[in-house]
Amino acid sequence: MSTPTDYALEARGLTKSFGGFHAVKDVNLKVRRGAIHALIGPNGAGKTTCFNLLTKTLTPTSGQVLLDGQDITGLRSAQVARLGLVRSFQISATFPHLTCLENIRVALQSSQGTAFRFWRSLGSIKALNEPARALLAQVGLAGQEDTLATELSYGKKRALEIATTLALDPKVMLLDEPTAGMGHEDIAPITDLIRAVSAGRTILIVEHNLSVVSSLCERITVLQHGEVLTEGTYDEVSNDPEVITAYMGGVDDE
Amino acid sequence: MTRYALFALFAVLAVLAPFQIYPILLMTILCFVVFASSFNLLLGYAGLLCFGHAMFFGTAAYLSGWMLKHTALSIELCFILAALAMAALGWLVGLISARRGGIQFAMITLAISQFVYFLLLRAPFTGGEDGLQRIPRSALFGVFDVSSNVALYFVVLVFSVLAIALFYRIVHSPFGEVLRAIRDNEDRVESLGFQPERFKILALTLSAGLAGLAGAMKAAVFQIATLHDLSFHVSGTIIFMTLLGGLGTMTGPMVGAALIVLLNDELAQFGEWALIIQGTVFLAVILFFRKGVVGEIKARFWKPAKS
Ligand SMILES: Nc1ncnc2c1ncn2[C@@H]1O[C@H](COP(=O)(O)OP(=O)(O)OP(=O)(O)O)[C@@H](O)[C@H]1O
Ligand SMILES: [Mg+2]
């Protein structure tokens, strides 16, 4: 029997209804500390809604969220982020009209207490430039410091987004379809990047590309119609007849 | 350095200008340059469309006008106090509206400005439909006589330069960086551990203070403050100036403000035709200068050279 704090992130009976419709229904989820855990399921299964509930972007109708055993259900999303639970978005979420360096620096300012200083020059936070450059280099964006985010290729935007998330040095990262819409040539580097940054962190990832899932994740939770269908290792899950039917029922791309 | 050369040139021109050009016209330009910059801070750098921005301009005109007329305060204090009062009003408006974005924010600010309009219409000290008339130009620091147009011009010039410097600093500050990030993607900023509405409230406070300074100066320049200063017409004009010059550039809205003031001055002789000509200009800008005058010039002739 494991202690509750073996789990970095836990959802208990998480439910969200929009009107009468249950987008997420009684989801119980435990993400082991240090693991890369996948959340998969057909389109509309409620994966993104789950993320929104975990990070308090949405308020759950009922249920609890625990970070390191601490109940964070009552907190605001900004507070959740400061506690070390940081998410990325399904649609690429950079700051398009800021340079790459500025994108990262904004995130770095989050822990600095400088963000309200309207009377100081940017020179006052130049100590953040070095860590920002290092983060850019870590995701393969060295030399792009002054490029506007909007000018980056799709794959590089996702890399920038991961670097921005990393700037908060999160304990738990939630990645919503980090490889969605990417060509083959971009998928392998992002997969490697996620593996590299997972050291010392816990990652929960929504991913449709099953080869990415199988290569990264030790544990997989399958969601369908807002409910947990099953949970297990890749082999267990992929041979589960229920999962196969769920995917056959809800096929489109992958 | 070309930058310093430009500053020097500007300084020389600014000092010589009132001896060549009618000072009232120059001061009008300066007031609207500051006013447009305050609006630009919100729309261009925070992504907030304030439909009632004239409430800060017009209320400050009344406040500064009233203080100049009925108190012994020196002129610079009247300007500063009116600006601070508007910063407080901006903070209040921010508290009410900052959780909303987009068109909701625009409508709330419009509604509040209508409310303020009504309050001032009924207030005992505003002179009702007539407004405040014959506002005196009190002495600077209580000593220097600035009742002449040229003398007042230099007061207005100094305040305007300081206001633009503050605007520049805000935009290029740690706060300004987060503000621009909020403009680009508010949800993302929140997910990084910030509370965007607090930044928006501060932006509105600062912007309202700058708009207030513009209005306060305007009251001393024209020696009159009326309800027109806080009408929707003025709110609309400032939007027009900003878009004409080019959103998202620092200088665009300033240029837009100067162009419109000059245009109105030229058009005054055409009476009602002025509106039609203005409308035509607006249409032409929308069709041919999508990024505004300055934005378009930058896009065509400036090579993207960033630090
Ligand atoms: N704000 C909302 N209001 C109403 N219904 C919503 C809302 N957000 C999501 N839903 C519904 O909840 C269900 C789950 O949506 P969600 O985005 O969580 O699915 P998903 O598993 O992330 O799908 P995808 O793989 O397409 O990203 C969908 O049927 C969606 O239409
Ligand atoms: Mg989704």
Image (spheres, coloured by chain):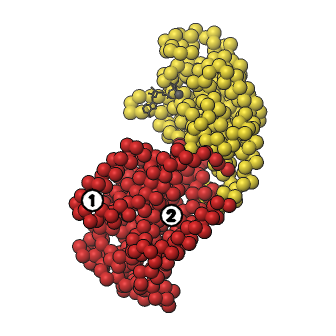
Residue B208: x and y in percent read 45, 64
Q: Residue at x 56, y 31 (%)?
A: A90
Q: Which mark is residue B206?
A: 2
Q: Residue at x 33, y 64 (%)?
A: B266
Chain that is coloured red in the picture:
B
Question: In which quarter of the view is residue B273 placed?
Answer: bottom left
Residue B249: x and y in percent read 52, 53
Answer with mark 2 or mark 1, whichever residue precedes in sequence: 2
Say whether mark 1 is within 8 Å of ligand 1: no
Residue type beneath disc 1: Ala
Asked if residue B269 lies left or right of residue A168, the reply is left
Q: Which mark is residue B225?
A: none
Residue B170 sits above or below residue A159 on the image: below
Residue B9: x and y in percent read 58, 67
Q: Residues within 10 Å of mark 2 (few under 14, many from 20)?
A: many
Label 1 sits on residue: B274
